[in-house]
Image (cartoon, helix red, strand yellow):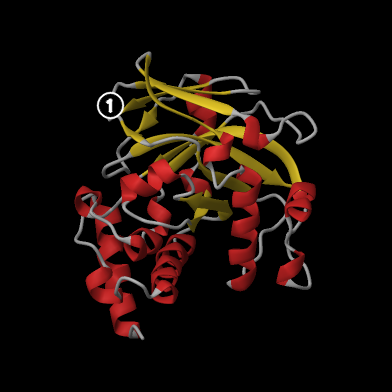
Amino acid sequence: MTSQDSIAAAVARLSQALATRVPCAPVRDLIGTDDLEAAYAVQQGLVQARLAAGATVVGRKIGATSEAVQRQLGVDQPDFGYLLDEMDVSAGALDGADPISMRTLVQPRVEGEVAFVLAKDIDPADEADITIKLVRDAVEIALPALEIVDSRIADWAIGFTDTVADNASSGLFVVGRDGRSLDELEPRDVTMSLTINGEERSSGNGAACLGDPLEALRWLAVQAYRFGDPLRAGHLILSGALGPFVPFAPGDRVEATISGFAPLRVQFVE
Protein backbone atom coordinates (compact mmCIF):
# COMPACT_ATOMS: atom_id res chain seq x y z
CA MET A 1 0.00 0.00 0.00
CA THR A 2 1.36 3.39 -1.02
CA SER A 3 2.13 5.72 1.88
CA GLN A 4 0.62 9.17 2.26
CA ASP A 5 4.11 10.63 2.09
CA SER A 6 4.64 9.04 -1.33
CA ILE A 7 1.29 10.33 -2.56
CA ALA A 8 2.16 13.82 -1.33
CA ALA A 9 5.55 13.64 -3.05
CA ALA A 10 3.88 12.67 -6.33
CA VAL A 11 1.44 15.58 -6.02
CA ALA A 12 4.35 17.95 -5.38
CA ARG A 13 6.33 16.66 -8.38
CA LEU A 14 3.42 17.01 -10.80
CA SER A 15 2.37 20.36 -9.35
CA GLN A 16 5.83 21.78 -9.90
CA ALA A 17 5.86 20.53 -13.50
CA LEU A 18 2.47 22.14 -14.12
CA ALA A 19 3.56 25.44 -12.59
CA THR A 20 6.95 25.64 -14.30
CA ARG A 21 6.12 23.90 -17.61
CA VAL A 22 9.24 21.80 -17.07
CA PRO A 23 8.44 18.10 -17.53
CA CYS A 24 9.17 15.83 -14.61
CA ALA A 25 10.11 12.20 -14.09
CA PRO A 26 7.29 9.64 -13.94
CA VAL A 27 5.66 9.23 -10.53
CA ARG A 28 5.44 5.44 -10.65
CA ASP A 29 8.65 5.30 -8.59
CA LEU A 30 6.55 6.82 -5.79
CA ILE A 31 3.17 5.12 -6.25
CA GLY A 32 4.00 1.94 -8.13
CA THR A 33 2.63 0.66 -11.40
CA ASP A 34 -0.64 -0.94 -10.33
CA ASP A 35 -1.93 0.95 -7.27
CA LEU A 36 -4.87 2.72 -8.91
CA GLU A 37 -6.19 3.94 -5.56
CA ALA A 38 -2.92 5.78 -4.99
CA ALA A 39 -2.90 7.16 -8.55
CA TYR A 40 -6.39 8.59 -8.18
CA ALA A 41 -5.42 9.96 -4.75
CA VAL A 42 -2.61 11.90 -6.45
CA GLN A 43 -5.09 13.11 -9.08
CA GLN A 44 -7.41 14.30 -6.30
CA GLY A 45 -4.54 16.15 -4.66
CA LEU A 46 -3.79 18.02 -7.88
CA VAL A 47 -7.44 18.81 -8.57
CA GLN A 48 -8.15 19.96 -5.02
CA ALA A 49 -5.17 22.34 -5.16
CA ARG A 50 -6.57 23.91 -8.33
CA LEU A 51 -10.02 24.18 -6.79
CA ALA A 52 -8.50 25.89 -3.74
CA ALA A 53 -6.89 28.38 -6.14
CA GLY A 54 -10.29 29.28 -7.61
CA ALA A 55 -11.06 26.72 -10.32
CA THR A 56 -14.38 24.89 -10.50
CA VAL A 57 -15.27 21.42 -11.76
CA VAL A 58 -17.37 21.49 -14.95
CA GLY A 59 -17.24 17.81 -15.86
CA ARG A 60 -15.07 14.79 -16.53
CA LYS A 61 -12.92 13.37 -19.30
CA ILE A 62 -12.40 9.76 -20.25
CA GLY A 63 -8.93 8.86 -21.48
CA ALA A 64 -7.42 5.98 -23.44
CA THR A 65 -10.74 4.77 -24.85
CA SER A 66 -9.46 3.88 -28.31
CA GLU A 67 -7.00 1.13 -29.18
CA ALA A 68 -5.00 3.66 -31.21
CA VAL A 69 -4.48 5.92 -28.19
CA GLN A 70 -3.84 2.96 -25.87
CA ARG A 71 -1.03 1.91 -28.22
CA GLN A 72 0.33 5.46 -28.28
CA LEU A 73 0.34 5.61 -24.48
CA GLY A 74 1.36 2.02 -23.81
CA VAL A 75 -1.70 1.33 -21.63
CA ASP A 76 -4.45 -1.26 -21.86
CA GLN A 77 -7.48 0.30 -20.16
CA PRO A 78 -9.32 3.62 -19.94
CA ASP A 79 -9.03 6.15 -17.15
CA PHE A 80 -10.76 9.38 -16.17
CA GLY A 81 -9.94 12.88 -15.03
CA TYR A 82 -11.66 16.12 -14.08
CA LEU A 83 -12.53 19.05 -16.35
CA LEU A 84 -12.09 22.48 -14.78
CA ASP A 85 -13.50 25.77 -16.00
CA GLU A 86 -10.00 27.14 -16.60
CA MET A 87 -9.38 24.34 -19.14
CA ASP A 88 -12.25 25.51 -21.38
CA VAL A 89 -10.91 27.69 -24.21
CA SER A 90 -13.95 27.30 -26.46
CA ALA A 91 -15.37 30.80 -26.60
CA GLY A 92 -12.58 32.87 -28.07
CA ALA A 93 -11.12 30.00 -30.08
CA LEU A 94 -14.35 29.31 -31.96
CA ASP A 95 -14.93 32.99 -32.66
CA GLY A 96 -11.50 33.11 -34.30
CA ALA A 97 -10.68 36.28 -32.40
CA ASP A 98 -8.66 34.60 -29.69
CA PRO A 99 -6.24 31.85 -30.80
CA ILE A 100 -5.44 29.28 -28.15
CA SER A 101 -2.32 30.13 -26.18
CA MET A 102 0.11 27.30 -25.53
CA ARG A 103 1.69 29.11 -22.59
CA THR A 104 0.14 26.76 -20.01
CA LEU A 105 0.99 23.60 -21.93
CA VAL A 106 4.06 21.38 -21.69
CA GLN A 107 4.02 18.86 -24.56
CA PRO A 108 0.49 18.92 -25.96
CA ARG A 109 -1.33 16.71 -28.45
CA VAL A 110 -4.80 17.16 -29.96
CA GLU A 111 -7.63 14.70 -30.61
CA GLY A 112 -11.21 14.81 -31.85
CA GLU A 113 -14.09 13.37 -29.86
CA VAL A 114 -17.77 13.50 -28.98
CA ALA A 115 -18.80 15.36 -25.83
CA PHE A 116 -22.02 15.03 -23.84
CA VAL A 117 -23.85 17.48 -21.60
CA LEU A 118 -25.91 15.76 -18.91
CA ALA A 119 -29.48 16.76 -18.17
CA LYS A 120 -29.74 14.48 -15.13
CA ASP A 121 -27.57 13.14 -12.35
CA ILE A 122 -26.33 9.58 -12.87
CA ASP A 123 -26.59 8.46 -9.28
CA PRO A 124 -28.85 5.40 -8.99
CA ALA A 125 -29.44 3.36 -5.87
CA ASP A 126 -27.34 0.50 -7.19
CA GLU A 127 -24.34 0.26 -9.55
CA ALA A 128 -26.11 -2.46 -11.53
CA ASP A 129 -28.67 0.15 -12.59
CA ILE A 130 -26.03 2.07 -14.59
CA THR A 131 -26.99 0.79 -18.03
CA ILE A 132 -26.63 2.19 -21.54
CA LYS A 133 -30.30 3.14 -21.40
CA LEU A 134 -29.81 5.02 -18.14
CA VAL A 135 -26.87 7.06 -19.42
CA ARG A 136 -28.53 7.70 -22.79
CA ASP A 137 -31.58 9.06 -21.00
CA ALA A 138 -29.32 11.32 -18.92
CA VAL A 139 -27.76 13.01 -21.96
CA GLU A 140 -29.17 16.40 -22.92
CA ILE A 141 -27.06 16.96 -26.05
CA ALA A 142 -24.00 15.65 -27.86
CA LEU A 143 -21.38 18.10 -29.09
CA PRO A 144 -18.20 17.99 -31.18
CA ALA A 145 -15.01 18.51 -29.18
CA LEU A 146 -11.28 18.93 -29.44
CA GLU A 147 -9.29 17.83 -26.45
CA ILE A 148 -5.78 19.18 -26.05
CA VAL A 149 -4.18 16.43 -24.00
CA ASP A 150 -0.90 17.12 -22.24
CA SER A 151 1.58 15.33 -20.03
CA ARG A 152 3.67 16.82 -17.31
CA ILE A 153 5.89 13.71 -17.52
CA ALA A 154 8.97 14.02 -19.70
CA ASP A 155 8.72 12.59 -23.24
CA TRP A 156 5.26 11.12 -22.52
CA ALA A 157 7.16 8.21 -20.94
CA ILE A 158 4.12 7.20 -18.91
CA GLY A 159 2.67 4.09 -17.39
CA PHE A 160 -0.97 3.76 -16.43
CA THR A 161 -0.59 5.10 -12.89
CA ASP A 162 1.41 8.06 -14.25
CA THR A 163 -1.35 9.21 -16.58
CA VAL A 164 -4.08 8.64 -13.97
CA ALA A 165 -2.13 10.68 -11.41
CA ASP A 166 -1.61 13.46 -13.96
CA ASN A 167 -5.40 14.04 -14.20
CA ALA A 168 -5.61 11.62 -17.12
CA SER A 169 -3.06 13.69 -19.08
CA SER A 170 -5.49 16.58 -19.43
CA GLY A 171 -4.74 20.04 -20.78
CA LEU A 172 -7.42 22.17 -22.44
CA PHE A 173 -10.59 21.57 -24.42
CA VAL A 174 -12.80 23.15 -27.05
CA VAL A 175 -16.48 22.25 -27.36
CA GLY A 176 -18.66 23.30 -30.29
CA ARG A 177 -21.97 25.10 -30.02
CA ASP A 178 -23.67 22.90 -32.62
CA GLY A 179 -25.39 20.35 -30.39
CA ARG A 180 -27.47 17.36 -31.38
CA SER A 181 -29.90 15.29 -29.37
CA LEU A 182 -29.46 11.53 -29.34
CA ASP A 183 -32.66 11.32 -31.38
CA GLU A 184 -30.79 13.18 -34.12
CA LEU A 185 -27.40 11.50 -33.88
CA GLU A 186 -26.05 8.06 -32.96
CA PRO A 187 -22.59 8.59 -31.41
CA ARG A 188 -21.18 5.19 -32.41
CA ASP A 189 -21.90 5.95 -36.08
CA VAL A 190 -20.00 9.23 -36.38
CA THR A 191 -16.81 9.57 -38.38
CA MET A 192 -13.99 11.98 -37.55
CA SER A 193 -11.24 13.63 -39.56
CA LEU A 194 -8.66 15.93 -37.97
CA THR A 195 -6.42 18.12 -40.09
CA ILE A 196 -3.49 20.36 -39.25
CA ASN A 197 -2.87 23.16 -41.74
CA GLY A 198 -5.13 21.37 -44.21
CA GLU A 199 -3.41 17.97 -44.00
CA GLU A 200 -5.31 15.06 -42.46
CA ARG A 201 -3.38 13.78 -39.47
CA SER A 202 -5.94 11.63 -37.66
CA SER A 203 -9.18 9.86 -38.48
CA GLY A 204 -11.54 7.45 -36.79
CA ASN A 205 -15.12 6.78 -35.83
CA GLY A 206 -17.47 6.42 -32.90
CA ALA A 207 -16.98 2.67 -32.69
CA ALA A 208 -13.29 3.27 -31.88
CA CYS A 209 -14.32 4.76 -28.52
CA LEU A 210 -14.93 1.60 -26.44
CA GLY A 211 -17.27 0.45 -29.21
CA ASP A 212 -19.61 3.42 -28.60
CA PRO A 213 -19.08 6.80 -26.88
CA LEU A 214 -22.18 6.01 -24.83
CA GLU A 215 -20.47 2.86 -23.56
CA ALA A 216 -17.54 5.08 -22.53
CA LEU A 217 -20.01 7.29 -20.68
CA ARG A 218 -21.51 4.23 -18.96
CA TRP A 219 -18.01 3.10 -17.94
CA LEU A 220 -17.28 6.54 -16.50
CA ALA A 221 -20.58 6.64 -14.63
CA VAL A 222 -19.71 3.31 -12.97
CA GLN A 223 -16.25 4.56 -11.95
CA ALA A 224 -17.65 7.85 -10.64
CA TYR A 225 -20.26 5.93 -8.62
CA ARG A 226 -17.58 3.66 -7.15
CA PHE A 227 -15.43 6.66 -6.20
CA GLY A 228 -18.39 8.27 -4.43
CA ASP A 229 -18.45 11.27 -6.76
CA PRO A 230 -21.32 10.60 -9.21
CA LEU A 231 -21.84 12.44 -12.49
CA ARG A 232 -24.18 15.41 -12.13
CA ALA A 233 -26.68 17.30 -14.26
CA GLY A 234 -24.91 20.05 -16.18
CA HIS A 235 -21.60 18.19 -16.32
CA LEU A 236 -19.73 18.15 -19.62
CA ILE A 237 -18.24 14.76 -20.47
CA LEU A 238 -15.45 14.31 -23.00
CA SER A 239 -16.05 10.71 -24.01
CA GLY A 240 -12.66 9.88 -25.50
CA ALA A 241 -10.67 10.04 -28.71
CA LEU A 242 -12.12 8.78 -31.98
CA GLY A 243 -8.65 8.41 -33.50
CA PRO A 244 -4.96 8.86 -32.63
CA PHE A 245 -3.84 12.08 -30.98
CA VAL A 246 -1.28 14.19 -32.85
CA PRO A 247 1.26 16.88 -31.91
CA PHE A 248 0.97 20.47 -33.08
CA ALA A 249 3.00 23.66 -32.89
CA PRO A 250 2.42 27.41 -32.46
CA GLY A 251 0.81 28.85 -35.57
CA ASP A 252 -0.91 25.60 -36.54
CA ARG A 253 -4.54 25.62 -37.68
CA VAL A 254 -6.45 22.57 -36.47
CA GLU A 255 -9.82 21.48 -37.82
CA ALA A 256 -11.91 18.54 -36.65
CA THR A 257 -14.83 17.38 -38.77
CA ILE A 258 -17.16 15.00 -36.94
CA SER A 259 -20.13 13.84 -38.99
CA GLY A 260 -23.43 15.32 -37.91
CA PHE A 261 -21.78 18.49 -36.54
CA ALA A 262 -20.33 21.70 -37.90
CA PRO A 263 -16.52 21.55 -38.12
CA LEU A 264 -14.42 22.87 -35.25
CA ARG A 265 -11.64 25.22 -36.36
CA VAL A 266 -9.02 26.63 -34.00
CA GLN A 267 -5.54 28.12 -34.18
CA PHE A 268 -2.70 27.89 -31.67
CA VAL A 269 -0.15 30.50 -30.70
CA GLU A 270 2.82 30.47 -28.34
Mark 1 highlights which residue?
250
Task: Work out which quarter of the rendered image holds the C terminus and state it.
Answer: top left
Question: Is 103 placed left or right of 95 in the picture?
Answer: left
x and y percentages locating residue 245 in the rendered image: 38, 37
- The answer to whether 182 is drawn above or below residue 73 in the figure is above
Query: Residue at position x 42%, y 55% from top?
Result: 168
Task: Work out which quarter of the rendered image holds the N terminus and state it.
Answer: bottom left
Question: Is 106 placed left or right of 189 in the picture?
Answer: left
The image quadrant that residue 124 belongs to is: bottom right
At label 1, the amino acid type is Pro
Crowdedness of circle 1 by 10 Å Cα count: few (<14), some, many (20+)? Answer: few
Residue farthest top in this picture: 198
Residue closer to the observer: 161 or 57: 161
x and y percentages locating residue 223 in the rendered image: 58, 65
Residue closer to the observer: 91 or 172: 172
x and y percentages locating residue 244 in the rendered image: 39, 36
Question: Is 135 placed left or right of 42 in the picture?
Answer: right
Question: Is 185 placed left or right of 163 in the picture?
Answer: right
Residue closer to the observer: 194 or 106: 194
**Can the viewer see residue 119?**
no
Query: Residue at position x 75%, y 47% from top?
Result: 136
- The answer to whether 59 is drawn above or below residue 256 in the figure is below
The image quadrant that residue 45 belongs to is: bottom left
- Number of callouts: 1
Query: Residue at position x 70%, y 34% from top?
Result: 186
**Can the viewer see residue 249?**
yes
Q: For mark 1, give the secondary structure.
A: loop
Query: Residue at position x 50%, y 36% from top?
Result: 242
- The answer to whether 143 is drawn above or below residue 15 in the figure is above
x and y percentages locating residue 181 in the rendered image: 76, 34
